Image: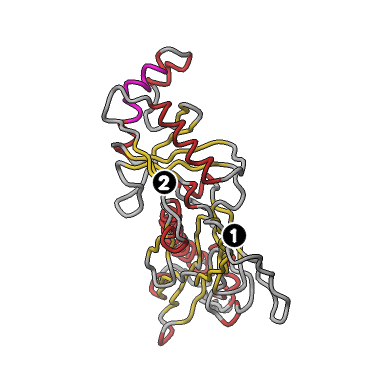
């Protein structure tokens, strides 16, 4: 039987690896699970965004020579964002399959496939984690530029963040009244745009103070939902028409401990994720995918270097409609 080289060109091609990394089981962060961000691929390295009265909308990409979208009035401005590029590297060494194949066996390929899947899964998890961090930034009214810097959308577009203190350190604070005020802030910022509800993503201190607040506990004790006071304190709950939940973050990706963000739900295009194509000759002028992976042989045939990358731009198109809540 002919000896089989497991490091075949087909197994390590751009198409094969990209398909593999995109087909891996997705384990997103909470913002990914909620489906807040509307995802779409673009064929350019820049996303053009139109601003009018503090509201952002993504402009269509047109072929060269096609007529541009007309601008109506001086109140509209066009902003261009360069999509961030997020690459990372891994290796698969020939030694990793050394001693696995018995004479006349082709099981090296099976071992290599397992190693490749493990590497791609690790790279994919790192990219997912980075994507979640960019989305948390967008929730707070920021975006990551092509240099990796977090930039304020409020400063860029000349709007202000609305902040409301819930005064949770005071036992007599009327939480429902605070919720009504936050609702009014959202309605004013949306200027007539309808929404289906409000979800509040809470930092850990804000959450602890909220679920143990005297007014919240008294309200639940006097209803059929009193049993909720005995359930897992990490679960979301409804109060005053808002759905509150604790955002479980990390030291690097988190909502401030004493903060929370009230997000109106059911608004198409409130949060956008746009994926630009990879910087490979094969992907020029193609619609961007969430993930890419490519490889090249190491010197002296000692294995393969693998690169995985994502090129995501994450924006909030109505940053003033996301209300920042504080403990005190």
Q: Residue furthest bottom?
A: 300
Q: Residue furthest front?
A: 74
The quarter of the rendered structure image containing the C terminus is top left
Circle 2 packing at 10 Å, graded few (<14), some (14-19), many (20+), is some
Label 1 with label 2: CB-CB less than 8 Å:
no
Identify which residue is drawn at 27% across, 27% down: 170
User: Compared to 313, does 307 lie above or below?
Assistant: below
Rendering quarter of residue 164: top left
Q: Is residue 217 one of those drawn in magenta? A: yes
Q: Nearer the viewer, residue 307 or 67?
A: 67
Identify which residue is drawn at 31% across, 32% down: 167
Q: Which residue is mark 1?
A: 57
- What secondary structure do most residues of the magenta stretch adopt? helix
Q: Is residue 241 one of those drawn in magenta? A: no
Name the side, left or right, on which 139 lies relative to 74. left
Q: Nearer the viewer, residue 94 or 64?
A: 64
Q: Which residue is mark 2?
A: 162
Is label 2 in a helix, a strand or a loop? loop
**Which segment is the magenta one?**
210-219
Name the side, left or right, on which 50 lies relative to 67. left
Q: Is residue 105 visible?
A: no
């Amino acid at each position: 039987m002919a000896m089989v080289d497991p490091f075949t060109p087909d197994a390590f091609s751009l198409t094969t690896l990209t398909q593999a990394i995109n087909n891996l089981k997705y384990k997103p962060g909470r913002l990914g699970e909620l489906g807040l961000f509307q995802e779409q691929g673009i064929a350019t390295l820049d996303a053009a965004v139109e601003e009018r009265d503090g509201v952002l909308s993504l402009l269509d990409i047109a072929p060269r020579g096609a007529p541009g979208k007309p601008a109506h009035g001086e109140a509209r401005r066009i902003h261009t964002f360069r999509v961030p590029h997020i690459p990372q590297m891994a290796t698969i060494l020939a030694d990793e399959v050394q001693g696995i194949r018995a004479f006349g066996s082709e099981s090296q390929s099976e071992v290599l496939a397992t190693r490749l899947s493990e590497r791609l899964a690790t790279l994919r998890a790192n990219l997912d984690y980075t994507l979640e961090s960019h989305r948390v930034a967008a929730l707070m009214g920021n975006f990551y530029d092509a240099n990796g810097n977090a930039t304020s959308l409020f400063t860029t577009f000349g709007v202000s963040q609305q902040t409301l203190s819930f005064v949770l350190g005071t036992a007599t604070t009327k939480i429902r009244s605070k919720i009504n005020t936050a609702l009014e802030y959202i309605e004013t910022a949306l200027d007539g745009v309808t929404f289906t509800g409000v979800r509040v993503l809470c930092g850990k201190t804000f959450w602890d103070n909220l679920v143990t607040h005297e007014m919240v506990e008294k309200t639940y004790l006097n209803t059929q939902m009193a049993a909720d006071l005995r359930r897992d304190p990490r679960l979301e709950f409804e109060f005053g028409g808002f759905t509150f939940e604790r955002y479980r973050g990390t030291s690097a990706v988190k909502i401030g401990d004493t903060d929370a963000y009230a997000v109106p739900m059911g608004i198409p295009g409130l949060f956008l994720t746009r994926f630009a194509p990879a910087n490979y000759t094969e992907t020029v002028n193609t619609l961007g995918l969430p993930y890419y992976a490519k490889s090249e042989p190491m010197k002296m045939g000692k294995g393969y270097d693998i690169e995985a990358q994502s090129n995501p731009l994450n924006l909030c198109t109505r940053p003033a409609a996301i209300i920042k809540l504080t403990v005190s």
